[in-house]
Amino acid sequence: MAIMYNEKNGSFKLDTKGTSYVIGIVDEEKFVGHAYYGPRLLDDDVNYLLKTGEAPFTPEKNSRDRLSFLDCFPQEYPTGGVGDFRESAVMVRDNGGHRALALTLSDYRIYKGKDPLAGLPATWGSEEDTETLELTLVDKVLGIKAILSYSVFEGIDAVARSVRLVNDGEAPVTIERVMSASIDMDNREYDKIILHGSWARERHIDRTPVSYGVQSTSSLRGESGHQQQPFMALLEKSATQDAGEVYGINLIYSGNCMTLADRGQFDNVRLMTGINPEGFSWKLNPGEAFQAPEAVLVYSAEGLGGMSRAFHDLYRNHLIRGEYRDKKRPILINNWEATYFDFNEEKLLAIAKEASALGIEMLVMDDGWFGNRFDDNRALGDWEVNEEKLKGGLKYLVDEVNKLGMKFGIWFEPEMISPDSDLYRAHPDWAIQIPGRTAGLARNQYVLDMSRTEIQDYIFDKMAAVLHSANIEYVKWDMNRPLSDIGSAALSAECQGELFHRYVLGVYWLQERLITEFPKLLLENCSGGGARFDAGMLYYSPQIWCSDDTDAVERLTIQEGTALIYPLSAMGAHVSDCPNHAVGRTTPFETRGYVALAGTFGYELDVTKIPAEDREQIPAQVEMYHKYNDLVRTGDYYRLASYQQNRMYDCYMVAAKDKSEALVTYIQVLGRPNSHSRRILLKGLAADKLYRIEGEERTYYGSTLMQAGILMENIWGDFKGKLIHIVEA
Ligand code: GLA
């Protein structure tokens, strides 16, 4: 890892373990060009790629064709309005209503470590393992500065980029668009991958060719959303899990976002990500700054697997924080699918008693414990314990659960307000709404205006009072509807366009306060299942509930898509009862355990009511989790087969960083007549190490297991699974 500036040639080079990222400064005007991103280079100057020698590419020599320069020059941070007709990364409207910006280099700084991003989640690093480059670009007419920041990390092939706009001019401007990162490259017949979905079917992988024009994936819901992810990968047509070039881009942000690829007339492609410009504007007065979220770029020459492992390493080591970052999480049992709203302290204690005897370590009380919340039509905002339901109060319940040797966790939906709530009756203007227009309800609730400090303070105090009142060690932070009818009673007309982003900043601020006040708390984010499974949330909570769909088969696709970017340590995954509440499917209890093992592991069922033969399997599943979780949480992830693609079976493995052991999880979704064993080729082992398959006598070289493979016998029936533990001999 290193960042170098070559003064003579005017280029900046960022090296990671296996990649180089080169920025070239050209012409007397100091245009900032994107020269290269790919496998590591020995040369530090590749400015010849910026075509400065060719007419009409240098404006200084050929000002009559200035526009053709701007429209094909590979820009590092493209602006609009002055001649680059492709998608721009940044646009401001000046005091006179004009839209134009031309950014050229004015200064730079290289420093060890990495400064935090004010108010936003971001990767972090120390002076020993992280280095940062800051380029200051300036528009000489308006005095607007764009400070581009790039960080590289020891041992990880990723670059973290962000942008800060500063108004150093005399007059206010309005930011209409500020993307966090953009790269221009030649299109080598790329495919693109996005993750799409819906409630209960989040993050399905979708691969299509990059066609001409703009193709994007985005959210306008005020959250990253079930439907699309702040992520895109461009990859060679021939790229597979193991080979081929892949560029991945992921935004560390939880609100409206947009990622796009723009393939142009010269077969170049511009890839960018940032806050979705639709519905966004931000007034920037002289002397003020605006910090855009951070984006992460990963280049992998080892196919999609290489990209996933780089994201996992970066997020595990430089994004996730707190007490549980490197710890095994307690096995929890959540009462949502067990009881829905129909519970009291007796039912919960009966579940806890049975669960603790089986080895489960934490009871989580889900929705329905507060105010008048007997169903989902009321009481959000009334964060006071309903002692009719919980006789003896919260402390009694928590103490009783603790006496069983279990931890206790609780559910909140802090950002919401029900029209039928004491809070709404007292503060109807606290809901996001547009005056004169009836705001739309979803799940019979409105969204609180989290941009307002008095609302943040109120909610924080309410949550803190509950959390201080008993020994509560876990919070599930839910968010069950998107934002609509965007209006804040506290913002002026010219600043209403700031609400979406200010809302997200308010949520971040509240979560930061929560984990600061309760540093030992395990926070799990959730949003109607997995509608806010994003890197922004991972900065505050080490785990996120993946999906309300807990069916073992559906989860294979959801978890494969999630693990394309996010580490297994972050994936909330539970064993639930059958027929499954989302799809009505019945799968073996054992298989549900194998599938949940890919994530944080827990239960989502009434353990007092499930069939005895299922309950009897829980102690063995608990043992399995304790045996394998360190490996699953910390190891390297390799996908061996995808049920989403082959519609028959799924297989992935996790190999220890030191290659001393590995765990293969194989799920045969559908039985197949007249079938033989399948050969599965393992990955990520040391070729020359000797391994044993647990339960067998003989040894194999890693190369044998990887090149010749192992035999996975055909299993009789559907939905059957198998774990194979490989250990160094
Ligand atoms: C969301 C969550 C569920 C559950 C319910 C409670 O749908 O994803 O796990 O907490 O809310 O209302």
Image (spheres, rainbow, N blue to C red):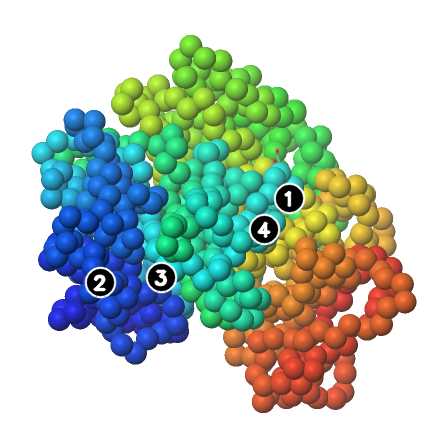
Element under disc 1 = loop
**Residue matched to label 4:** 206
Callout 4: 10 Å neighbours few (<14), some, many (20+)? Answer: few
Q: Which residue is mark 1?
A: 201
Whether residue 651 is visible to the viewer of this picture, yes or no, is yes
Q: Are marks 3 and 2 in contact (CB under 8 Å)?
A: no
* Foreground disc of the pair 3, 4: 4
Q: CA distance from mark 3 to mark 4?
A: 24 Å
- The kind of secondary structure element at disc 2 is loop
The residue indicated by pointer 3 is 159
385 sits left or right of 126 in the view: right
Give the foreground label among 3 and 2: 2
Q: CA distance from mark 1 to mark 3?
A: 30 Å
Sequence-first tag of 3 and 2 = 2
- Snapshot quadrant of residue 608: top right
Comparing 14 with 293, the one in front is: 14
Q: Write down the residue under mark 2.
A: 54
Mark 2 or 4, nearer chain start:
2
Q: Residues within 10 Å of mark 1 (few under 14, many from 20)?
A: many
Q: Is residue 648 above or below residue 164?
A: below
Q: Which percent across, then down, holds residue 627?
A: 65, 69
